[in-house]
Image (spheres, rainbow, N blue to C red):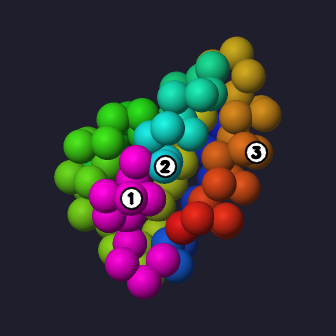
Amino acid sequence: MKTFTYTITDPVGIHARPAGLLAKAAKTSGSKVTISANGKSADASKLIMLMGLGIKCGTEVTVSVEGGDEAKAAADMEQFFKDNL
């Protein structure tokens, strides 16, 4: 399992549009991606679960990637976060 932490810099946090992009990116990965924040966690490929985390600007999230291509998937997810969140 690969993990990394990231502090959300998007001024409105993970709202509908970025959550949709994140879920889409997580679905293309061959690995399971889990986001943890505020004492809760969610499958990153599930839009409603992501939005239910209530992640706002400045929140530190932990991203866990587990599966066959976890090294590449973790690197891709980390780049996604830097580019979009």
Q: Is residue 54 left or right of residue 4?
A: left
C-alpha span from label 3 to label 2: 16 Å
Which image quarter: residue 81?
bottom right
Q: Is residue 44 magenta?
A: no
Whichever of callouts 3 and 1 sits on the residue coming sooner in the sequence is 1
Q: Is residue 37 visible?
A: no
Q: Which residue is mark 1?
A: 17
Q: Which residue is mark 2?
A: 21
* Residue positioned 54% across, 67% down in the render: 85
Residue sitting at x 73%, y 22%: 69
Frontmost residue, 5 versus 83: 83
Would you say the residues marked 1 and 2 are in contact, meaning their CB atoms lie under 8 Å apart? yes
Q: What amino acid is at disc 3?
A: Ala
Q: Is residue 72 above or below residue 61?
A: above
Residue 19 vertical position relative to residue 7 in the rendered view, above or below: above
Q: Earlier in the sequence, mark 3 or mark 2?
A: 2
Q: Which residues are magenta?
A: 10-20
Residue that label 3 marks: 75
x, y percent for residue 22: 49, 48
Rate crowding at label 3 as few (under 14), some (14 to 19) or many (20 or more) other CA atoms within 10 Å: some
Q: Residues within 10 Å of mark 2 (few under 14, many from 20)?
A: some
Q: Residue at x 32, y 64 (%)?
A: 15
Please state if 46 lies on the left or on the right of 73 as rendered: left
Q: Amino acid at mark 2?
A: Leu
Q: Quadrant of residue 53?
A: bottom left
Q: For the point 24% across and 43% down, which residue is it? A: 48
User: What is the spatial separation of the Cα atoms under label 3 and label 1, in whole angstroms?
Assistant: 22 Å
**Given the image, on which type of amino acid does mark 1 rest?**
Arg
Label 2: element kind:
helix
